[in-house]
Image (cartoon, rainbow, N blue to C red):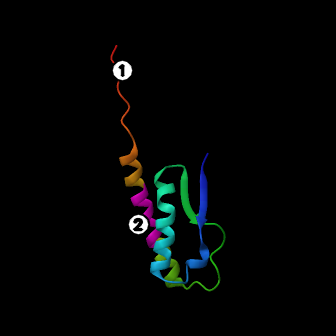
Amino acid sequence: MRFVGHFDKMVMNKGEAAMRGECERLLPAAAGGGFLVSCDHQTPPGVSYQEYLLYLKLFEEYAAEAGRRSQQQRVPTPIAHG
């Protein structure tokens, strides 16, 4: 099963610290796999273009971090010798 969403769009116009806090909240679930952080609905009308660009920058940053954590969490599968 895969999930997309859960980013609280209401923090998008509250500054970088608020957006980072939301990304941090969702990072463990994203790193676990099967979950892509995204805005659940359309971007609210009060979000400026610059704030939206910041959201995209943070999305890229935290997606990369989730990928790194995901790779670290994987346990290598032993190779069967027969």
> Which element carries disc 2, helix, strand or loop?
helix
Q: Which mark is residue 66?
A: none
Q: Amino acid at mark 1?
A: Ala
Q: Which portion, as a residue range, is magenta?
A: 57-66
Point 60% across, 64% down: residue: 6
Find disc 1 in the rendering and name its residue. 80
Q: Amino acid at mark 2?
A: Glu
Q: Is residue 62 shown above or below 31?
A: below
**Residue for badge 2:** 61
Image location of residue 29, percent across then percent down: 51, 55
Q: Quadrant of the N terminus?
A: top right
Judge whether 41 appears above or below 70 on screen.
below
Q: Position of residue 46 (x, y in %)?
A: 62, 86
**What residue is rendered at 45% in x and 71% in y?**
58
User: For numbered disc 1, what is the local secondary structure?
Assistant: loop
| Secondary structure character of the magenta stretch overall | helix
Quarter of the picture holding the C terminus: top left
Residue found 60% across the figure and 62% down from its top: 5
Horizontal side of residue 18 vs 45, given as left or right: left
Q: Is residue 15 above or below residue 31?
A: below
Q: Is residue 33 above or below residue 55?
A: above
